Image: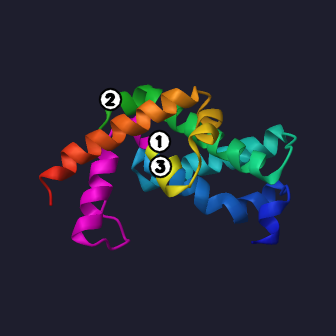
């Protein structure tokens, strides 16, 4: 295990250590590289300005994820977002046809299902931890995971 993963990091260290995590999380929500980079930058600037006191390294990681998700939700509420349509992006990461189908199916899910699926399957959080991060009941997380999986199953059934 990385030594940095067990200690609370300064904002500068956090950018290096958690930057990719925050960017991946933002991208999974907004599906646009430039918007995701802007959101990640805002999250770390917010951390620098607020200088929150963290109880542990896991608390710091959860705080960064929570701020990222909140910032993504704010991004969707802006007038600009509600009146524009983004361009389709070609991902630079090559996926197999099966992986591309899964990525597209997950990206097509509504935000509330997409975020719990991302946190559970990609980041490896338990349903209790996701509930804390998203400030929702654990049973709600379980319901959203089940509904998201069902939606994925339905959309992927004809693809393979």
Direction from residue 57 to residue 64 in the image, left or right: left
Q: Establish if 71 lies above or below 120.
A: above
* Circle 1: element type: helix
Tag in front: 3 or 2? 3
State yes or no: discs 1 and 2 in contact (Cβ < 8 Å): no
**Which residue is at a point 24% across and 47% down the rendered structure image?**
153
- Range shown magenta: 87-116
Q: Position of residue 44 (x, y in %)?
A: 70, 49
**Which residue is at a point 49% across and 27% down the rendered structure image?**
140
Which residue is more in the foreground, 61 or 24? 61
So how many labels did they put on this image?
A: 3
Q: How far separated are the C-alphas under marks 3 and 1?
A: 5 Å
Q: How far separated are the C-alphas under marks 1 and 2?
A: 23 Å
**Which residue is at a point 77% across and 45% down the rendered structure image?**
59
The residue beneath circle 1 is 115
Label 2 crowd bin: few (<14), some (14–19), many (20+), radius 10 Å: few
The residue beneath circle 2 is 83
State yes or no: discs 3 and 1 in contact (Cβ < 8 Å): yes
* Circle 2: element type: helix
């Amino acid at each position: 295990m990385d030594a940095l993963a067990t200690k609370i990091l300064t904002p500068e260290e956090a950018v290096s250590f958690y930057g990719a995590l925050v960017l991946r999380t933002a991208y999974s929500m907004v599906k646009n590289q430039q918007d995701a980079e802007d959101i990640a930058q805002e999250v770390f600037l917010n951390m620098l300005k607020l200088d929150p006191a963290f109880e542990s390294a896991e608390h710091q990681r959860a705080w960064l994820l929570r701020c990222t998700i909140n910032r993504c939700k704010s991004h969707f509420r802006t007038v600009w977002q509600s009146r524009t349509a983004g361009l389709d992006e070609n991902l630079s990461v090559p996926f197999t046809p099966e992986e591309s189908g899964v990525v597209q199916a997950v990206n097509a899910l509504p935000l509330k299902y997409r975020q719990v699926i991302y946190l559970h399957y990609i980041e490896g959080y338990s349903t209790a931890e996701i509930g804390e991060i998203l400030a929702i009941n654990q049973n709600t997380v379980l319901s959203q995971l089940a509904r998201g999986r069902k939606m994925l199953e339905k959309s992927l059934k004809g693809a393979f």
